[in-house]
Amino acid sequence: MAFDKFKDECGVFGIQPYCEAANLTYLGLYALQHRGQESAGLVAAEQGRLTCYKRMGLVADVFSEAALRDLTGDAAIGHVRYSTAGESRLENAQPILITSHHGQIALAHNGNLVNAVQIRESLERSGSIFSSTSDSEVILHLIARSSAAEIEDAIVEALAQVSGAYSAVFLTADKLIAVRDPHGFRPLAMAELGEAKLFASETCAFDLIDAKFLREVEPGEMVIVNERGMVRSLFPFEKKPTRQCIFEHIYFARPDGLMFGESTQAYREALGMKLAEENPVDADLIVPVPDSGVCAAIGYSRQSGIPLSFGLIRNHYVGRTFIEPKQSIRHFGVKIKLNPVRSLIEGKRVVLVDDSLVRGTTSRKIVKMVRQAGAKEVHMRISAPPTTHPCYYGIDTPTRNELIASSHSIDEICRYIEADSLAYVSREGMFSSLQGSRQEQYCDACFSGNYAVPFPKNGAPV
Ligand code: AMP
């Protein structure tokens, strides 16, 4: 069975000790919903006994009141996951709960392991039986094989064998353990609420439940929380250069958080200002592509002095399950999601601002739609450099040959999307817009092809 490669986008949460651990985890996952919409799950520990509940669907649909009532105990971890269609199966939902000679252990993992295929093949040859196609299961098999006496040592032994991205929370009968890979590709933050310690992919999960953000789990750090909320921190792995994901800031994370020492909203606005400074255009109106382009459009408008209007309105209730009518009306396409406001756009020279251009198909449809709404000119501005390489560390990007900028010049892309002009923020501009962190701390492989962890050839997409 093939692995569910490179397609996981996830959010994780953990809390101990708190009387309503499962309820707070539910709320935390609710805040992290944007990180994964296909499955949600929760493991709660009640007097050393772990119980798992996970289903396909959105957080609010997965957990009924009755389900939450049964998830008693004062420790819990949770997970939301997105994978592309076809690979989306319940057996790949997380947390994964297993029983081994170390007792029960549950894992919620965000990130992609680049050597999971090789490890799995070798484990299978020696008799392991896998129950999912998720790379995360490999970690649990390696833990189960460890003869270390303490669970944290077994986790360290297991993680020392995998490479790639992991920001993970583990729950055992008495410990909550959070760990971030030595490069720190994916985020993981820490907070407190009374005695309880909490971990979450993004700080917005803490805001919702009034927990106090303490700090980020450092790249290469393992934080162990005991039943009384006491914390121990270890740096058990070989030190590697920090490579946090710049695309979390550009697109993936919610803007209302602090990540990698940076306000995501402030960064996106600064990117928009840089974009305007580097690529000005004589126009009448800035229109954000909602929701991803909103912050950068605010910055673009501020820097250029051109007014901003919400000239594209998004329907927020479009599910991933929507099916277009096959016969009657063909190609609803992007219109299902977005509708232009003709009264704002008609007769205007419009600058559309979005955060990224991947395949180019969305931009092409939006440009056409805005022209049909009467725009005199349509200029496209992107608050990221051209996306030329796929991500192997946990952002869902198509294969290299589907990335339009991997094989086409900016002029060619501009012609393809049928815009009057197209411009991206430069790589230098992307980094100089950072305010609380430094360029060297970031992975920008999707824009540069500089991969911090090489990808073994037989598992790599092309
Ligand atoms: P495309 O048609 O492939 O060029 O899509 C570009 C749009 O996809 C932009 O509006 C982006 O905000 C959005 N986007 C970029 N990366 C991702 C991702 N990993 N998952 C979902 N949407 C994305």
Image: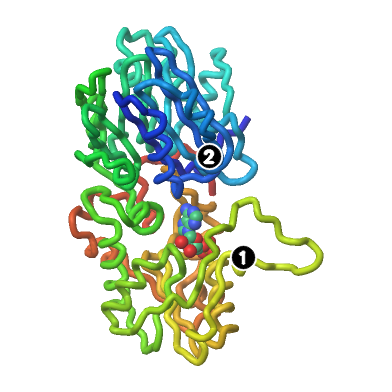
**Whether residue 185 can be seen here:** no
Q: Secondary structure at mark 2?
A: loop
> Is the residue 460 above or below the residue 369 in the image?
above
Q: Position of residue 301 (x, y in %)?
A: 32, 78
Colour scheme: rainbow
Q: Which residue is found at the position 52% from the left and 89% from the top? A: 346
> Is the residue 240 above or below the residue 385 in the image?
above
The answer to which of 209 and 126 lies nearer the viewer is 209
What residue does disc 1 label?
Answer: 336
Label 1: how many residues lie within 10 Å, few (<14), some (14-19) or many (20+)?
A: some
- Specify the quadrant of the image occupied by residue 368: bottom right
Q: Is residue 72 left or right of residue 124?
A: left
The answer to which of 61 and 436 lies nearer the viewer is 61
Q: Position of residue 333 (x, y in %)?
A: 64, 66
Q: Which mark sits nearer the N-terminus, 1 or 2?
A: 2
Label 2: how many residues lie within 10 Å, few (<14), some (14-19) or many (20+)?
A: many
Q: Which residue is found at the position 36% from the left and 89% from the top? A: 282
The answer to which of 293 and 338 lies nearer the viewer is 338
Q: Is residue 69 left or right of residue 416?
A: left
Mark 1 and mark 2: Cα distance apart in space: 29 Å
**Amino acid type, mark 1:** Ile
Mark 1 or mark 2, whichever is nearer to me: 1
What residue does disc 2 label?
Answer: 5
Q: Position of residue 389 (x, y in %)?
A: 45, 55
Q: Is residue 277 left or right of residue 390?
A: left
**Amino acid type, mark 2:** Lys
Q: Secondary structure at mark 1?
A: helix
